[in-house]
Image (cartoon, grey):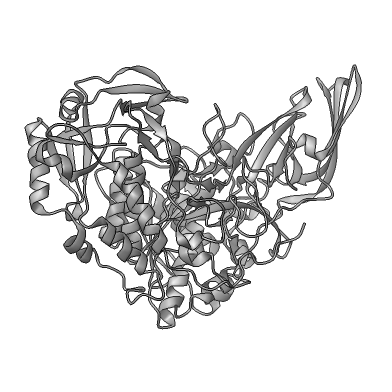
Amino acid sequence: MAEGKSKVADAGVVFRWLSFVTAVVAMSSIFLSASPGDGKLVANNTPSYVASAKNLGAENPAKLIEVSLWLQLHNRSEFDALTQSLYDRTSPNYHHWLKPSDIAARFAPTAQEVKTVQEFIAAHNLQLVKMGPINFYIRARGTVGDLEKAFQVQLNNYQVGDKTIRSNASDPYVEGAAGPLVRAVSGLDTGEFEHTLVVRPTSLGRSKSAAMAVSGPDFFSSQCFTGTEKESFSTNGDGELPIGTYSGNKLNLESQTSPGCGYTPSEIQTAYNLTGLYNKGFNGAGQTIAIVDWCGSFSIQDDANAFSTQFGLPQLTSSNFNIIYTAHSECITFDQTEINLDVEWAHAIAPGANINLVVPPSPSFQDVDEAEFDVANRSLGNVLSGSFGSPEAFLAATEAETESLIAEIGAATGISFNYSSGDSGNFALPDPHIATVSAPADSPWATAVGGITLALNSDNSIAWQAGWGNIETRLAQEGTVFDPPIGDFIGGSGGGPSNCVTKTNSFRRPICISGFPKPLYQHGFVPGLFRQLPDISWLADPFTGAVILISIPGQFPEQVFQVVGGTSLAAPMFSGLWAIANQEALAGGGTELGQAAPYLYSLPVGTVYDIVPVTSKTNVTGSIQDSNGTTKYTAAQLAKNPTEPFVSALWDIFNLEETTFLLSFGTDLGLHTNKGWDNVTGVGTPNAQAFADFFFGK
């Protein structure tokens, strides 16, 4: 297994996105269409699943809900062109970031336009809840019945997979003078973001808290692969057929005496050459990471400080850590794994940076979008880290465009909106779903962070990295020998083309159309005509994951260590490094860098590790003896015949007798690593010191 060479050749800096302007404006134009009569149809404001999901019936007309009306910008094409020029080295606007007040003065809706929309709200028996900053949106409350009358829609409940989701059955209509002013109506549906987080399953049939309760991180090993082993299993454990025999790599997970492998900050800092940055004073000082996570945690500061004490990191105090609730939260609790992961690992990578934890009251698109808008408008960070997403194919086009617009405002003000790229490969399972990508990472104005599997040597140097993608194959479980073995994809880095922003056809039914166009910074590096994900990657495989500390009430001790993964881990790690890159830029007399993605495709050799397929000479092979004879299984057959090289290992489930699974690594769903940019890992993983040093004075 060998580490690949640097992924990106020094092809010069590509910052001009001028060919992208026309495509963005054309795409934006589909979001508002004229309709006969006095008003406007807010076109493409219906999620795509409405066309095919089972209709469970009308929503309760007396139920109170809230909606947000996002207003049209002024001079949108001018704003797009100006934002792009901020990243064009040949432009006099290069790195002259806009202030929120500049955006308000030149592009925001006017007070009179807001008044007109408020009059529409009042005329339809709706109550004003909130005026969004700089007139960008208006939030209102009303009964389902009143909202249906106001927007001339039917609100139904739909069965979408295993979820019940409310949605409008058709696009909303805004009558009168307010019609041309409304760009999108959010909140008619109950769509939500989900965290891209995976807590490592350490044993079957045990609770997360029980499985992960250990007294300290010293129990975790940095060695996830520990030699080879050979095991045999018989039916009922007494020699009955079938009998399965397997040999190959051994995965170091939970046992009677150890919780197995899990990486600590010092091990990651050594592996990716962060310690050299710290020795020069580059640790994110003077920068602020805005982390967006909903609901809130009662114990996050105490947990993060216990984590910091354990690993020699600075304490989080009122001078470097702030929690900002965007609205009253009724779901704040303990055991918010995502919040602990994001705060602790952003801090582990950039221990000198400030952190603003920005907390919307729910994971709804409506609440999270407004929280992200606060980050951009209030300049709450130089970097935004978002470890969440939703399949692009499930979004209304207006929602996808709202998310992208907020990221663009961030890019215009010099903030990089970094999002996890998802944990489900290309989303083609289950059902199957249409292959798609994760939003809001799909925006050309966002930086999409994918994931990898990591194996370390005993000195914490990198042994190998693979694009994250796991197939789990059941070999034997409590007296049952699976004949043949049963395998399924269980998680992997999200990626691929933006290809399913929806619009409404002539029958007012949502259909899938082309996605966001390919930005110029990807030209010459990625295939196709559309935005491709991810841009870069970092640690994400939960089976080679990172250690966090978290409080679990009722557990003894209450503060315990867990191993986590998912691109939820990769995003705050990269956001921490991007804060350090900004510090280097300023230290050398340059400016803050803004969006990360445009720089990543023209980095010099040595700044990133190319992630290419890896394999092992000792991948797991096996045989099953049954009444028909003996059937031999190759490593590829046990891993369900992946199309590229991979690594496989045996996983012993210690608390279940005669139970062993096989796990494969480098086997993502519908996606593949290769030399250069790929749709699992982007341009690769950062060689942190060389990566950040490149931006000195930029």
Q: Is residue 164 left or right of residue 177?
A: right
Visible residue check, residue 381: no
Q: Is residue 297 left or right of residue 350?
A: left
Residue 443 screen position, x and y as percent: 41, 51
Residue at horizontal 64%, vertical 36%? 489
Residue at horizontal 69%, vertical 33%? 655
In the picture shown, does residue 75 fall above or below 692? above
Q: Which quarter of the picture shows residue 454?
A: bottom right
Q: Quadrant of the C terminus?
A: bottom left
In the image, 114 versus 133, the foreground residue is 114
Visible residue check, residue 238: yes
In the image, 606 versus 502, the foreground residue is 502
In the image, 116 versus 302, the foreground residue is 116
In the picture shown, does residue 61 fall above or below 496? above
In the image, 33 versus 415, the foreground residue is 33
In the picture shown, does residue 322 fall above or below 26? below
Instruction: State the count of labels.
Output: 0
Residue 608 screen position, x and y as percent: 60, 66
Residue 166 screen position, x and y as percent: 32, 26
- Furthest toward the bottom, the residue is 589
Q: Is residue 623 left or right of residue 78?
A: right
Residue 169 screen position, x and y as percent: 30, 25
